[in-house]
Image (tube, rainbow, N blue to C red):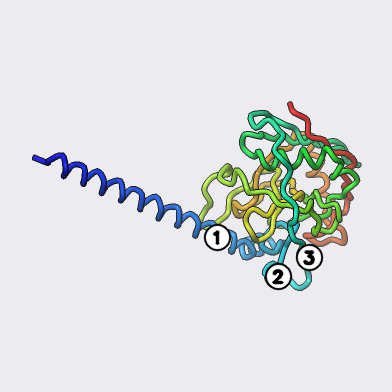
Amino acid sequence: MVSSDQRRRQLARQKFERQQQRREQARHRSRQRNAIIAAAVAVVLVAGGAVWALGLGGDDTGKDDAAAASEATPTPSATESSAPEPPMTIDRKAKYAFEITTNEGELSIAMDAAKTPHTVNSFKALADKGYFDDTKCHRLTTAGIFVLQCGDPDGNGTGGPGYTIPDENLDALGEPGEDGTVTFEAGTVAMANTSRPDSGGSQFFLVYKDSKLPPAYTPFGTLDEDGLKLVQAVGTAGVEGGGTDGAPAKPVTIEKAAVPKV
């Protein structure tokens, strides 16, 4: 018969073993995430030759990104985040829409603040002050990865708001496959970033055809049907000069953007 003291020691040992197991699992997830991010360049290059450094371009790409990118493809210059992200003013339980008027037509992106509060709050703060107005979508890819990238006031992939926001909702697209990627389905809207976690700023990308990428980019919205058709038409028109990665041949300018609660 087990005494009460023996039972307590047994329970304590089991609790300790569970804690150790949880810690080891956390360390494993961290190592796995770092490995996935580090493998992004190889994944993208194999996928179709579109060079994205270790990210989809961003607001503070550094020297490591430049070394990894093709010499023929300029990488974003380094800029430091010096300002705090905007104070949280949105309703975290509400749905919002990122409504964009472009020279090619209207886009509406459904956003769920409960899943990506920092991202939604940042986009609303930026849109409210006209940050996205009169900016161009500067990058299109047409091989392996099929996205249109926007949100850079400088129009060359180096600009940002001067602050960064944390990654969110990264497990929304499921577990990565053996190649370390998940499928970003057509219509998905996600944050661009650099090689570092939690490095999103204002740049985002619109997926117009299913694309495989590491789960390192915050998926924060979904394009409506008309918006997806608009971006698909831009993708069909191709890249300026006939390449697979560069300025879209059919220029897209964001004329006005707003983030109302819906």
**Secondary structure type for disc 2:** helix
Which residue is label 1 attached to?
34
Q: Secondary structure at mark 3?
A: loop
Identified by mark 1, the residue type is: Asn
Query: Label 1 neighbourhood size at 10 Å, few (<14), some (14-19), many (20+)?
Result: some
* Residue at image location 56% in from the left, 59% down from the top: 36
Mark seen at residue 77? 3
CB within 8 Å, label 2 to label 3: no
Q: Residues within 10 Å of mark 2 (few under 14, many from 20)?
A: few
Position of 187 relative to 71 (above/below):
above
Mark 3 vs 1, N-terminal side: 1
Residue found farthest to the front: 5
- State the separation of the CA atoms marked 2 and 3: 9 Å
* Separation of residues labelled 1 and 2 (CA atoms): 18 Å
Q: Does 131 sit left or right of 191 as displayed?
A: right
Q: Quadrant of residue 49?
A: bottom right
**Residue that label 2 marks:** 63
Kind of residue at badge 3? Ser
Between 34 and 148, the one lying in front of the other is: 34
Can you see residue 104?
Answer: no
